[in-house]
Image (cartoon, helix red, strand yellow):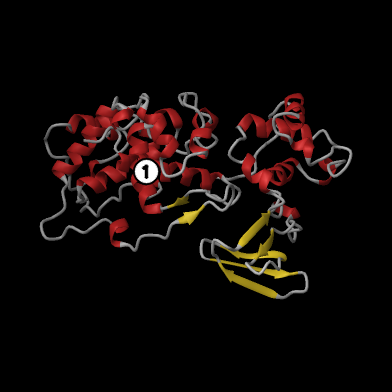
Amino acid sequence: MITLPGTDWLTHFARFCLAGTLLSSVAIAPGVARQLPDAPQKQTVLKLCGTCHSPNLVLGRNMTREQWSDTVSSMVARGAKGSPEEFSQVVDYLTANFPPKTGTAKAPAAAAAKPPKPRSIGQGADDQQVVDDVLADRGKKIYIAECITCHGPKARGANEGPPNLRGPDLVRSLTVLHDRYGNTIGAFLKKGHMTQSGTPSANFTATQIVDLSHFLHQRVGDTLRSGPFNSVLNVLTGDAKAGEAYFNGEGKCSTCHSVTGDLAGVAGRYDPPTLQQKFLFPATPSFGGRRAKSTAKPVTLTVTPPNGTAVTGELDKLDDFDVSLRDSAGDYHSWKRTPELKIEKNDPYAAHNALLLQYTDKNIHDVVAYLETLK
């Protein structure tokens, strides 16, 4: 039994059907009237769908309960609304009356496909979580069933815009940003948290928490500069005075930067979206019409082997097993990592990476508003 959020479903359902991504109509001979089978929940299906759609939209479709659930969940993830009880009844009805044909059931495409490789979001702390898309897909189902009513399909909460979304922005939540494979999300949920289905969050299993963690970290990655949810918007929505206070205080920006030195006139060199991008990700080139070759400072290493002769150069590789660099003369050096091998890493953007796990949306918007005053 799934429980899904919502209220008015018809507008979104109509749009989704017209796009051809929810339910495909089947070829019906002209003049042949076909009706949905008489069975429990039929009236609910007619109530939610029948005003705008012919029964032909579902007739001829034969899928498993999981596939019908995924279909309805996809609709909800795109903004569909209705009561949890009604959505459950729709799935119950479709499953009971349009099951896979005997001997012809096929595994869902996602199960048949080769699982995607885990992926990193590409920015932030060195120990950032590597997202497993298979687990994220499982976590998405939990999120849709338990969280989407308050936090929205993009997990941005009230920041997504619709007035019915009253939950906080999970993409910029410190609980999510500090989380690694469910350690902080799980601790929060185990304290007890309201869910849309009424299921106590303290009852979530360890597996469910990890899956939900992968989904939320996937949303974080999708909202970064290279993600599908990213778009250039009006970013000048903050308080410049609050941004100045953060710059000189909690953010400690003034310990490395000067508004009369390296940042003098910075707002005259960059438009607001590019200014925000450079503030958050200084090691990457700007986007839009001003994209250029990166002038980022390199990460350097100083490696001291047991013989005591230190070598310094630009980082080439550093993992649990090997380390390599290229020195100022262009010569390549590599070592196997051992307890006796001393490694010193100098990342000029370490402070910016650390702040990615500390900024709130307000901090970001306030600082950008302040930087925009530096003409």
Q: The C terminus appears in which quarter of the rendering?
A: top right
Left or right: 42 as drawn, with respect to 251: left
Is 225 rendered above or below residue 146? below
Is 27 rendered above or below residue 96? below
> Pointer 1: what residue?
210
**Rendering coords of residue 13 (x, y %):** 36, 38
Could one spot residue 58 in this view of the protein? no
The amino acid pointed to by label 1 is Val
Left or right: 116 as drawn, with respect to 92: right
Question: So how many labels did they put on this image?
Answer: 1
**Rendering coords of residue 295 (x, y %):** 76, 58
Nearer the observer, 81 or 312: 312
Nearer the observer, 248 or 81: 248
> Residue 10 is drawn in which quadrant?
top left
Left or right: 298 as drawn, with respect to 161: right
**Rendering coords of residue 48 (x, y %):** 29, 31
**Rendering coords of residue 183 (x, y %):** 42, 39
The residue carrying pointer 1 sits among few (fewer than 14), some (14 to 19) or many (20 or more) residues within 10 Å by Cα, namely many
Nearer the observer, 32 or 172: 172
Left or right: 157 as drawn, with respect to 44: right
Give the residue displayed 40% in from the left and 32% down from the top: 187
Give the residue displayed 35% in from the left and 29% down from the top: 190
Give the residue displayed 30% in from the left and 34% down from the top: 204
Q: The N terminus appears in which quarter of the rendering?
A: top left
Outermost residue toward the front?
Answer: 307
